[in-house]
Image (tube, rainbow, N blue to C red):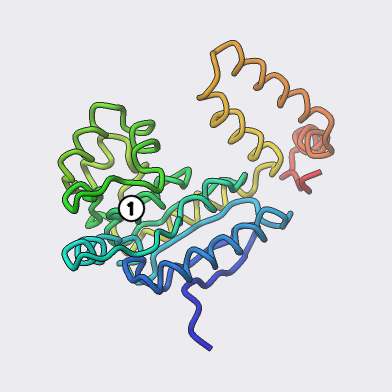
Amino acid sequence: MPEKTLQYQKKDHVLVIDLNSSLDRPLGQSRTSAELGELCDKATWDEEVHVVVIRDTREKAFLVEKDLTRAVSMGRETESQSFAEAISKLDRPVIAAITGDAIGQGLELALACDIRIASETSRFGLPQIKAGHIPWDGGTQRLSRLVGKSKALEMILTGEIIDAQEALRIGLVHKVVPKEDLMEVTMKMAQEMASKGPIALRYTKEAIYKGMDMTLEQGLRLEADLYLLIHTTKDRTEGIQAFRDKRTPKFEGK
């Protein structure tokens, strides 16, 4: 039986997904896409999962560049496999821990996450234009929403590769840390999120993402509706009682 391209573990309401295979290999792409979709489906129905972390254990897992240019130069195309779609459908917060480079479709996968934390040596780019292609797994849409239309156009039309500090400056990543501290910083943030009410986490994400495609008035109405729904949950009652008792709340996601 072939080795799985993904490994995962769940601890303290955080699901950590390890990308074990480089995404720039056609076989790895197909298997990773299928395994990632299946795992995300399970996480959606797992009430014990409050936050998801996805990391590149082999540093090149977020790198999808070489086989694209090689395939074009040889006059053949490979079947496209989406990585971002499964991640983007998760209603839990998703954090990408990027040890190496996030290039091409690997960056598109990282863009589908909610938070991106990178090592100081990481690089980022969408160089598909150099092979006569365009980003297709969400890159043209998500990058522009994160860094603005002007910078997204520059990066995609030139295919430039930027370093971690530039990615931090333009808002592509949220934190840049030494490589050896990456998982400690990532897990600290993930566990802090996971200690909060899981329903509140999901509703917050829904309000922000859906609100971006609405008018301000519609977005405010959505926010108010979700806020009122929170009032009907046991978690809200627990949060109030824990505050009164001066203790840490024990949320159940109900």
Left or right placement of residue 159 versus residue 170 in this view = left
Q: Position of residue 28 (x, y in %)?
A: 40, 72
Instruction: Give residue 241's quadrant in the image.
Output: top right
Q: Is residue 133 above or below residue 218?
A: below
Give me the residue at 34% from left, 32% from top.
144
Q: Residue at x 39, y 69 (%)?
A: 57
Q: Quadrant for the C terminus, please.
A: top right
- State the residue lying farthest toward the bottom: 1
Answer above or below: position of 224 versus 136.
above
The type of residue carrying mark 1 is: Ala
Nearest the camera: 61 or 37?
37
- Number of marks present in the image shown: 1
Is the residue 159 above or below the residue 99 in the image? Answer: above
Give how far across and how far down residue 103 sits, in percent. Answer: 27, 55
Q: Residue furthest top?
A: 217
**Residue 15: quadrant of the picture:** bottom right
Whole-percent x, y for residue 74 in the image: 18, 68
At which x and y percent is residue 175? Answer: 35, 45
Residue at (77% x, 23% y) in the render: 228
The local crowd at label 1, few if under 14, some if 14 to 19, many if 20 or more residues have their Cα within 10 Å, is many
- Horizontally, is 190 left or right of 228 in the view? left
Q: Is residue 20 above or below residue 236?
A: below
Instruction: List the residue tagged with mark 1.
Output: 118
From the viewer's side, name the closer residue of 250 and 8: 8
Q: Residue at x 53, y 63 (%)?
A: 36
Q: Does dot 1 land on a helix, a strand or a loop? A: strand
